[in-house]
Amino acid sequence: MKEYNGFKNCGSWYKGNIHSHTTVSDGMLTPEQSVKLYKENGYHFLCFSEHDIFTDYREQFNTENFIIVPAVESSVVLYRAKGTNERYKIHHLHGILGTQAMQDAAPLGTYKHMQYIPPMKFFGEWTGPKAAQEVADMLRDHGCVTTYNHPIWSRVTEEEFIYTEGVSSLEIYNFNTVQESNTGYDVTYWDRMLRMGRRINGFASDDNHNEGLFEDSCGGWICVQAPDLSHDSIVQNFIDGNYYSSSGPEIHDWGVRDGKVWIDTSAVNHVNFVCGNIINDGTTVLGERFKDTLSHAEYPLKGHETYVRVEAVDRYGRTAWTNPIYLEW
Protein backbone atom coordinates (compact mmCIF):
# COMPACT_ATOMS: atom_id res chain seq x y z
CA MET A 1 0.00 0.00 0.00
CA LYS A 2 0.95 3.67 -0.06
CA GLU A 3 3.75 4.83 2.23
CA TYR A 4 2.93 7.58 4.72
CA ASN A 5 5.23 9.77 6.79
CA GLY A 6 3.84 10.85 10.14
CA PHE A 7 5.97 14.00 10.13
CA LYS A 8 7.19 16.25 7.34
CA ASN A 9 10.84 16.02 8.42
CA CYS A 10 11.06 19.72 7.69
CA GLY A 11 13.17 21.12 10.52
CA SER A 12 13.63 21.18 14.27
CA TRP A 13 11.34 20.38 17.19
CA TYR A 14 9.81 23.24 19.18
CA LYS A 15 7.98 22.64 22.45
CA GLY A 16 5.01 24.79 23.41
CA ASN A 17 1.91 25.23 25.53
CA ILE A 18 -1.01 26.64 23.56
CA HIS A 19 -3.47 27.01 26.47
CA SER A 20 -2.55 29.10 29.53
CA HIS A 21 -3.92 31.88 31.71
CA THR A 22 -2.41 34.79 33.60
CA THR A 23 -3.57 37.63 35.83
CA VAL A 24 -5.02 39.28 32.72
CA SER A 25 -7.99 36.94 33.24
CA ASP A 26 -8.21 34.32 36.01
CA GLY A 27 -4.63 33.09 36.34
CA MET A 28 -2.39 33.78 39.32
CA LEU A 29 0.90 34.43 37.48
CA THR A 30 1.62 37.63 35.62
CA PRO A 31 2.53 37.31 31.94
CA GLU A 32 6.15 38.00 32.93
CA GLN A 33 6.15 35.25 35.55
CA SER A 34 4.52 32.79 33.16
CA VAL A 35 7.07 33.45 30.43
CA LYS A 36 9.89 32.96 32.94
CA LEU A 37 8.39 29.66 34.13
CA TYR A 38 8.05 28.18 30.66
CA LYS A 39 11.41 29.37 29.41
CA GLU A 40 13.08 27.80 32.45
CA ASN A 41 11.36 24.50 31.60
CA GLY A 42 12.63 24.34 28.04
CA TYR A 43 9.62 25.69 26.15
CA HIS A 44 9.97 27.57 22.87
CA PHE A 45 6.51 29.10 22.48
CA LEU A 46 3.48 29.95 24.59
CA CYS A 47 -0.11 31.08 24.07
CA PHE A 48 -1.88 33.26 26.60
CA SER A 49 -5.49 32.07 26.37
CA GLU A 50 -7.17 34.73 28.44
CA HIS A 51 -10.92 34.35 28.81
CA ASP A 52 -12.59 36.60 26.24
CA ILE A 53 -9.54 38.91 26.01
CA PHE A 54 -7.21 38.75 23.02
CA THR A 55 -3.60 39.50 23.93
CA ASP A 56 -0.52 40.00 21.77
CA TYR A 57 2.69 40.14 23.82
CA ARG A 58 5.07 39.39 20.95
CA GLU A 59 6.84 42.73 21.09
CA GLN A 60 7.41 42.41 24.83
CA PHE A 61 8.51 38.77 25.10
CA ASN A 62 9.75 37.44 21.75
CA THR A 63 13.41 36.49 21.63
CA GLU A 64 15.56 34.37 19.34
CA ASN A 65 14.69 31.21 21.30
CA PHE A 66 11.17 31.93 22.57
CA ILE A 67 8.01 33.39 21.04
CA ILE A 68 4.49 34.29 22.08
CA VAL A 69 1.65 33.10 19.85
CA PRO A 70 -1.27 35.56 20.36
CA ALA A 71 -4.63 34.03 21.22
CA VAL A 72 -7.98 34.30 23.01
CA GLU A 73 -10.28 31.74 24.63
CA SER A 74 -13.82 32.73 23.62
CA SER A 75 -16.80 31.62 25.67
CA VAL A 76 -20.40 30.56 25.39
CA VAL A 77 -21.93 29.98 28.83
CA LEU A 78 -25.18 28.30 29.83
CA TYR A 79 -26.23 29.42 33.32
CA ARG A 80 -28.89 27.64 35.38
CA ALA A 81 -30.92 30.84 35.60
CA LYS A 82 -30.52 34.58 35.66
CA GLY A 83 -29.03 35.86 38.88
CA THR A 84 -26.91 32.77 39.50
CA ASN A 85 -23.30 31.94 38.72
CA GLU A 86 -24.05 28.23 38.41
CA ARG A 87 -22.81 27.15 35.00
CA TYR A 88 -24.36 24.10 33.39
CA LYS A 89 -22.34 24.03 30.19
CA ILE A 90 -19.60 25.98 28.43
CA HIS A 91 -18.16 26.20 24.97
CA HIS A 92 -14.53 27.32 25.10
CA LEU A 93 -13.23 27.88 21.59
CA HIS A 94 -9.64 28.99 21.30
CA GLY A 95 -8.69 31.51 18.63
CA ILE A 96 -4.96 31.38 17.82
CA LEU A 97 -3.71 34.16 15.57
CA GLY A 98 -3.26 32.62 12.13
CA THR A 99 -0.49 32.96 9.58
CA GLN A 100 0.16 36.28 7.90
CA ALA A 101 -1.81 35.11 4.87
CA MET A 102 -4.79 34.30 7.12
CA GLN A 103 -4.50 37.67 8.81
CA ASP A 104 -4.39 39.50 5.48
CA ALA A 105 -7.47 37.62 4.25
CA ALA A 106 -9.51 38.10 7.46
CA PRO A 107 -12.77 39.85 6.44
CA LEU A 108 -13.19 41.46 9.87
CA GLY A 109 -9.50 42.23 10.42
CA THR A 110 -7.46 40.91 13.33
CA TYR A 111 -8.07 41.46 17.01
CA LYS A 112 -6.01 44.07 18.86
CA HIS A 113 -3.99 43.61 22.03
CA MET A 114 -6.27 43.56 25.09
CA GLN A 115 -9.42 43.58 22.96
CA TYR A 116 -12.46 42.26 24.81
CA ILE A 117 -14.65 39.76 22.97
CA PRO A 118 -17.94 39.54 24.90
CA PRO A 119 -19.01 36.00 25.79
CA MET A 120 -22.37 34.68 24.65
CA LYS A 121 -24.65 34.02 27.65
CA PHE A 122 -27.70 31.79 27.92
CA PHE A 123 -30.00 31.09 30.88
CA GLY A 124 -31.89 27.85 31.41
CA GLU A 125 -31.42 26.53 27.88
CA TRP A 126 -29.20 27.27 24.91
CA THR A 127 -28.71 26.72 21.22
CA GLY A 128 -25.47 24.81 21.82
CA PRO A 129 -24.41 23.70 18.31
CA LYS A 130 -25.51 26.98 16.70
CA ALA A 131 -23.63 29.06 19.28
CA ALA A 132 -20.44 27.01 18.86
CA GLN A 133 -20.58 27.54 15.10
CA GLU A 134 -21.13 31.27 15.50
CA VAL A 135 -18.02 31.60 17.68
CA ALA A 136 -15.93 29.44 15.32
CA ASP A 137 -17.03 31.62 12.38
CA MET A 138 -16.25 34.79 14.31
CA LEU A 139 -12.73 33.63 15.17
CA ARG A 140 -12.08 32.57 11.56
CA ASP A 141 -13.28 35.94 10.26
CA HIS A 142 -10.72 37.59 12.54
CA GLY A 143 -7.87 35.55 11.09
CA CYS A 144 -7.62 32.90 13.79
CA VAL A 145 -7.00 29.17 13.83
CA THR A 146 -9.69 27.62 16.03
CA THR A 147 -9.52 24.78 18.55
CA TYR A 148 -12.21 23.31 20.79
CA ASN A 149 -11.14 22.98 24.43
CA HIS A 150 -11.87 20.44 27.23
CA PRO A 151 -15.38 19.18 26.28
CA ILE A 152 -15.71 16.77 29.22
CA TRP A 153 -14.91 19.47 31.77
CA SER A 154 -17.36 21.75 29.94
CA ARG A 155 -20.23 19.26 30.47
CA VAL A 156 -21.24 19.44 26.81
CA THR A 157 -22.65 16.46 24.95
CA GLU A 158 -20.91 15.40 21.77
CA GLU A 159 -23.84 16.53 19.60
CA GLU A 160 -23.34 20.07 20.86
CA PHE A 161 -19.90 20.53 19.32
CA ILE A 162 -18.66 17.69 17.07
CA TYR A 163 -20.28 19.10 13.94
CA THR A 164 -18.73 22.55 14.34
CA GLU A 165 -17.03 23.51 11.09
CA GLY A 166 -13.69 25.28 11.00
CA VAL A 167 -12.21 23.68 14.12
CA SER A 168 -8.60 22.63 13.50
CA SER A 169 -7.93 20.62 16.67
CA LEU A 170 -9.61 19.16 19.72
CA GLU A 171 -8.00 19.45 23.15
CA ILE A 172 -7.56 15.76 24.04
CA TYR A 173 -5.51 16.24 27.23
CA ASN A 174 -5.88 19.14 29.64
CA PHE A 175 -3.40 18.91 32.53
CA ASN A 176 -5.27 21.35 34.75
CA THR A 177 -8.62 19.58 34.60
CA VAL A 178 -6.98 16.15 34.93
CA GLN A 179 -5.50 17.35 38.22
CA GLU A 180 -8.62 19.23 39.29
CA SER A 181 -11.36 16.66 38.69
CA ASN A 182 -10.17 13.99 36.20
CA THR A 183 -12.16 15.70 33.43
CA GLY A 184 -9.26 16.38 31.08
CA TYR A 185 -9.09 13.21 28.96
CA ASP A 186 -11.07 13.74 25.75
CA VAL A 187 -9.79 11.11 23.31
CA THR A 188 -13.19 9.37 23.21
CA TYR A 189 -14.74 12.43 21.60
CA TRP A 190 -11.75 12.61 19.25
CA ASP A 191 -12.28 9.07 18.01
CA ARG A 192 -16.01 9.72 17.71
CA MET A 193 -15.24 12.55 15.30
CA LEU A 194 -12.60 10.58 13.41
CA ARG A 195 -14.89 7.57 13.04
CA MET A 196 -17.60 9.73 11.50
CA GLY A 197 -15.11 11.00 8.92
CA ARG A 198 -14.16 14.33 10.48
CA ARG A 199 -10.51 15.15 9.87
CA ILE A 200 -9.38 16.82 13.06
CA ASN A 201 -6.15 16.85 15.04
CA GLY A 202 -5.72 16.54 18.78
CA PHE A 203 -3.52 18.49 21.19
CA ALA A 204 -2.37 18.44 24.81
CA SER A 205 -2.01 21.53 26.97
CA ASP A 206 -1.74 22.82 30.52
CA ASP A 207 -4.65 25.27 30.81
CA ASN A 208 -2.63 26.46 33.78
CA HIS A 209 -4.03 28.98 36.26
CA ASN A 210 -1.37 28.49 38.97
CA GLU A 211 -3.82 28.89 41.83
CA GLY A 212 -1.65 26.84 44.20
CA LEU A 213 -4.28 24.12 44.70
CA PHE A 214 -2.29 21.61 42.63
CA GLU A 215 0.42 21.57 39.99
CA ASP A 216 -0.98 22.63 36.62
CA SER A 217 2.03 23.84 34.65
CA CYS A 218 4.41 21.95 32.34
CA GLY A 219 2.28 18.79 32.32
CA GLY A 220 0.80 18.84 28.81
CA TRP A 221 2.37 20.22 25.65
CA ILE A 222 2.87 19.90 21.93
CA CYS A 223 6.12 19.52 19.99
CA VAL A 224 5.89 21.14 16.58
CA GLN A 225 8.30 20.31 13.79
CA ALA A 226 9.07 23.46 11.83
CA PRO A 227 11.83 25.03 9.71
CA ASP A 228 12.32 27.83 12.24
CA LEU A 229 10.92 29.36 15.39
CA SER A 230 8.69 31.98 13.78
CA HIS A 231 4.99 32.68 14.10
CA ASP A 232 4.08 31.50 10.61
CA SER A 233 6.20 28.35 10.81
CA ILE A 234 4.77 27.26 14.15
CA VAL A 235 1.17 28.07 13.27
CA GLN A 236 1.26 26.56 9.78
CA ASN A 237 2.76 23.30 11.01
CA PHE A 238 0.20 23.23 13.82
CA ILE A 239 -2.56 23.58 11.22
CA ASP A 240 -0.94 20.85 9.13
CA GLY A 241 -0.77 18.47 12.11
CA ASN A 242 3.02 18.31 11.93
CA TYR A 243 3.42 17.86 15.67
CA TYR A 244 2.79 15.43 18.49
CA SER A 245 1.22 15.95 21.89
CA SER A 246 2.60 14.71 25.18
CA SER A 247 2.40 14.54 28.94
CA GLY A 248 5.80 12.85 29.13
CA PRO A 249 7.18 10.59 26.36
CA GLU A 250 8.80 11.71 23.13
CA ILE A 251 7.89 10.59 19.63
CA HIS A 252 10.89 10.59 17.30
CA ASP A 253 9.23 9.46 14.07
CA TRP A 254 6.39 7.31 12.77
CA GLY A 255 4.55 6.34 9.64
CA VAL A 256 3.27 3.55 7.41
CA ARG A 257 5.65 1.37 5.42
CA ASP A 258 5.29 -2.05 3.79
CA GLY A 259 1.75 -2.39 5.10
CA LYS A 260 2.75 -1.74 8.72
CA VAL A 261 2.34 1.23 11.02
CA TRP A 262 5.58 1.84 12.91
CA ILE A 263 6.72 4.28 15.58
CA ASP A 264 10.00 5.21 17.29
CA THR A 265 9.75 6.76 20.74
CA SER A 266 11.61 7.40 23.95
CA ALA A 267 11.45 4.42 26.33
CA VAL A 268 7.83 3.57 27.12
CA ASN A 269 5.83 0.73 28.65
CA HIS A 270 3.31 0.12 25.85
CA VAL A 271 2.11 1.50 22.54
CA ASN A 272 -1.54 1.75 21.45
CA PHE A 273 -2.39 1.70 17.73
CA VAL A 274 -5.88 3.19 17.51
CA CYS A 275 -7.73 2.67 14.23
CA GLY A 276 -11.10 3.14 12.55
CA ASN A 277 -13.44 1.67 11.59
CA ILE A 278 -13.93 -2.11 12.07
CA ILE A 279 -14.22 -3.79 15.48
CA ASN A 280 -10.84 -5.25 16.55
CA ASP A 281 -8.83 -2.99 14.25
CA GLY A 282 -5.78 -1.66 16.07
CA THR A 283 -3.76 -3.26 18.82
CA THR A 284 -1.61 -2.65 21.90
CA VAL A 285 2.04 -3.63 21.90
CA LEU A 286 3.07 -4.42 25.48
CA GLY A 287 6.53 -4.07 26.94
CA GLU A 288 7.78 -5.56 30.19
CA ARG A 289 5.35 -5.05 33.04
CA PHE A 290 6.02 -1.93 35.16
CA LYS A 291 9.08 -1.04 33.08
CA ASP A 292 9.79 1.22 30.14
CA THR A 293 11.38 -1.21 27.70
CA LEU A 294 9.85 -0.26 24.33
CA SER A 295 11.23 2.31 21.91
CA HIS A 296 9.86 0.82 18.68
CA ALA A 297 6.52 -0.83 17.86
CA GLU A 298 4.65 -1.96 14.76
CA TYR A 299 1.12 -2.87 13.74
CA PRO A 300 0.41 -4.84 10.52
CA LEU A 301 -2.59 -3.22 8.89
CA LYS A 302 -5.53 -5.47 8.01
CA GLY A 303 -6.59 -3.60 4.90
CA HIS A 304 -9.75 -1.72 5.86
CA GLU A 305 -8.61 0.81 8.49
CA THR A 306 -9.78 4.35 7.69
CA TYR A 307 -7.29 6.11 9.97
CA VAL A 308 -4.58 5.29 12.45
CA ARG A 309 -3.19 7.25 15.36
CA VAL A 310 -0.69 6.08 17.97
CA GLU A 311 -0.29 6.54 21.72
CA ALA A 312 3.01 5.87 23.50
CA VAL A 313 2.47 5.33 27.25
CA ASP A 314 5.15 5.08 29.92
CA ARG A 315 4.96 3.10 33.19
CA TYR A 316 3.50 6.13 35.01
CA GLY A 317 0.67 6.49 32.51
CA ARG A 318 2.14 9.57 30.88
CA THR A 319 1.25 9.54 27.20
CA ALA A 320 2.35 10.94 23.87
CA TRP A 321 -0.18 11.13 21.03
CA THR A 322 0.33 11.36 17.28
CA ASN A 323 -2.17 13.01 14.99
CA PRO A 324 -4.06 10.69 12.64
CA ILE A 325 -2.91 9.38 9.30
CA TYR A 326 -5.88 8.91 6.97
CA LEU A 327 -5.43 5.71 4.98
CA GLU A 328 -6.28 5.11 1.35
CA TRP A 329 -6.70 1.58 0.04
Image (cartoon, rainbow, N blue to C red):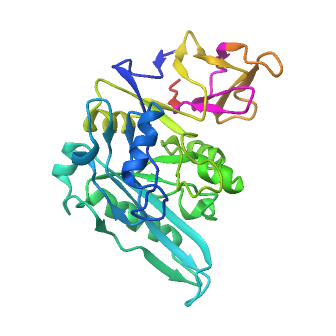
Q: Relative to the observer, which residue lies in front, 312 or 26? A: 26
In the image: residue 109, left or right of residue 208: left
Q: Residue at point 27% right, 60% down?
A: 141
Image side of residue 313 versus residue 8, left or right: right
28 horizontally vs 288: left or right: left
Establish if 143 lies above or below 248.
below
Please name the residue shown 39% across and 65% down the image: 135
Q: Which one is in front, 201 or 16?
A: 16
Query: Is 50 drawn above or below residue 325 in the view shown?
Result: below
Which residue range is magenta in the image? Answer: 295-324
Can you name the residue that lies furthest to the right here? Answer: 289
Q: Residue furthest bottom?
A: 83
Relative to 289, 173 lies left or right: left
Residue 61, by quadrant, is top left
Q: Quadrant of residue 219?
A: top right
Task: Tell me which corner region of the image, top left, top right, bottom left or bottom right, holds residue 156.
Answer: bottom right
Q: Position of residue 319 (x, y in %)?
A: 64, 32
Coordinates of residue 91 in the picture (x, y in percent): 51, 65
Q: How many numbered callouts?
A: 0
